[in-house]
Image (tube, helix red, strand yellow):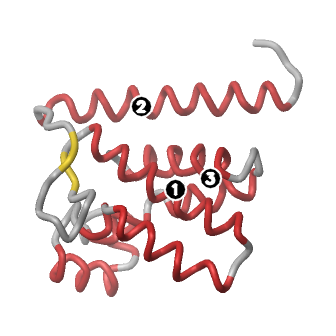
């Protein structure tokens, strides 16, 4: 999926796992793009090329940073330094990214196992699935905002 879809899905995940906290949504949005550090050609990978290049060389794309192990490692690393809700939002954003990528391809969910998990789709379907997912998430976010403002659509 594209970075913007990952950021929105991470935002929704962060908001959800923190019980409706908008700070959790912001943390989740950032965490939602972190797994793409393994791809130097991604927007996030280009920004942090000094981290992205070594990760890509060591692991490749959609392997370690797209695994349950990575989500756990990030959670363990951030937990001692932040409040618990931040840890939850980080893990939620990363898991949302992984699930999104599983909708448009395969990931090494159980890394270091070489088994790939996800849906293989034709490359032409990628954009359609990404756009439908993004639009659905945007509609959900608008619905949540409207509900918070006690408005009816």
Q: Is residue 151 above or below residue 133?
A: above
**Front-lying residue, 147 or 108:** 108
Is 26 left or right of 59, judged from the image as shown? right
* Callout 1 touching callout 3 (CB < 8 Å): yes
Q: Residue at x 15, y 30 (%)?
A: 124
Q: Tag 2 or tag 1, which sits nearer the N-term?
A: 1
Say what secondary structure mark 2 lies in. helix
Q: Residue at x 54, y 55 (%)?
A: 92
At label 1, counting other C-alpha atoms closer than 10 Å, the crowd grade (few under 14, some 14-19, many 20 or more) is many
Q: Is residue 104 above or below residue 92?
A: above
The quadrant holding residue 52 is bottom left
Determine which residue is flagged by label 3: 14
Is 20 left or right of 49, judged from the image as shown? right
**Front-lying residue, 152 or 112:** 112
Q: Tag 3 or tag 1, which sits nearer the N-term?
A: 3
Residue sitting farthest toward the right: 150
Which disc number belongs to residue 65? none
Q: Residue at x 19, y 29 (%)?
A: 125
Say what secondary structure mark 1 lies in. helix
Which disc number belongs to residue 133? 2
Determine which residue is flagged by label 1: 93
- Which-is-in-front pick, marks 1 and 2? 1
Q: Is residue 63 above or below residue 123?
A: below
Q: Position of residue 55 (x, y in %)?
A: 25, 80
* Callout 3 touching callout 2 (CB < 8 Å): no
- Which-is-in-front pick, marks 3 and 2? 3
Cα–Cα span, label 1 and label 3: 6 Å
At label 3, counting other C-alpha atoms closer than 10 Å, the crowd grade (few under 14, some 14-19, many 20 or more) is many
């Amino acid at each position: 999926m594209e970075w913007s879809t990952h950021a929105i899905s991470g935002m929704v995940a962060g908001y959800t796992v923190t019980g409706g906290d908008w700070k959790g949504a912001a943390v989740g949005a950032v965490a939602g793009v972190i797994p793409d550090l393994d791809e130097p050609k991604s927007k996030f990978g280009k920004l942090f090329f000094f981290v992205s290049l070594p990760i890509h060389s060591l692991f490749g794309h959609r392997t370690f940073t797209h695994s349950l192990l990575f989500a756990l490692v990030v959670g363990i690393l951030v937990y001692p330094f932040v409040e618990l809700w931040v840890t939850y939002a980080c893990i939620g954003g990363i898991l949302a990214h992984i699930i999104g990528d599983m909708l448009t391809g395969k990931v090494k969910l159980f890394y270091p196992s070489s088994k790939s998990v996800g849906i293989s789709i034709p490359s032409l379907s990628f954009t359609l699935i990404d756009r439908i997912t993004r639009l659905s998430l945007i509609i959900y976010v608008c619905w949540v905002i409207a509900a918070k403002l006690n408005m009816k659509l």
